[in-house]
Amino acid sequence: MLNRKLETISPEDYLRLEAQSPLRHEYVNGEIYAMTGASIRHNLIAGSIYAALRSHLKASPCRVLMEGVKLHVARDNAYYYPDVMVSCDPKLEKLTAADMVIDQPVVLVEVLSESTAGIDRREKMLAYRKLATLKEYVLVEQDSRHVEVFRRVGDVGWEQVILEAGDVLELTSLEFRLPLDEIYEGVGI
């Protein structure tokens, strides 16, 4: 068996290459992973959540961001593209057109697909929980009306809330409520 060291790149090189690439890639500790395209259902679900959050937060200092913005998890030397993010970081008031990275989210939302569900539930969940500002992590199924909310409880743990058809998604950190029927409106499930 041949043992070869995998080539890794620096975060700076990743950011430079990513800015020029027509495809999106996530970065974890020197390794780059290509992202697959999203389904129409995935886009509709993420868009519904984004639109509702944006409307709810329009008079607040918080901003809702979508897929094209990277999230930096410094403790894991990683950059991810969550489907929807909310950040209340004051730095967002002074953005330039070149800014594409945030590092202080309050809420992160991932719409699950068959190819990404395992990564979203394991690797990303472990990484995201290291973000001191993160209060809630939401996983949304796209093939059934099923949502999981992981909510930070004090400094020591997380609670899980499982929602099904007819329930209401509640993000306590934002005083936000959204019926699952509205999340899944027009997606055929």
Image: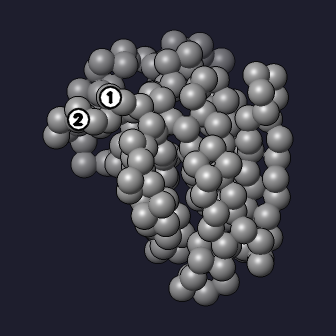
Tell me if I can see residue 111 in this picture.
Answer: yes
**Badge 1 amino acid:** Lys
| Separation of residues labelled 1 and 2 (CA atoms) | 7 Å
Within 10 Å of the Cα at label 2, are there few (<14), some (14-19), or many (20+) other Cα atoms?
few
Tell me: residue 53, above or below residue 145: above
| The quarter of the displayed image where residue 140 is located | bottom right
Within 10 Å of the Cα at label 1, are there few (<14), some (14-19), or many (20+) other Cα atoms?
few
Q: Quadrant of the C terminus?
A: bottom right
Residue furthest left in the image: 97
Tell me: residue 60, above or below residue 144: above
- Residue occupying the point 23% across, 32% down: 94
- Residue occupying the point 83% across, 41% down: 159
Image spot of residue 23 (x, y percent): 31, 48
Callout 1–callout 2 Cβ contact below 8 Å: yes
- SS category of the residue bearing label 2: loop
Q: Which residue is mark 2?
A: 95
- Residue occupying the point 69% across, 58% down: 170
Image spot of residue 182 (x, y percent): 59, 77
Tell me if I can see residue 118 in this picture.
Answer: no
Q: Nearer the viewer, residue 63 or 47?
A: 63
Q: Which residue is mark 1?
A: 91
Image spot of residue 69 (x, y percent): 36, 43
Tell me: residue 33, above or below residue 44: above
**Along the horizontal axis of the image, is 92 left or right of 171?**
left
- SS category of the residue bearing label 1: helix
**Along the horizontal axis of the image, is 146 left or right of 15?**
right
Q: Quadrant of the N terminus?
A: top right
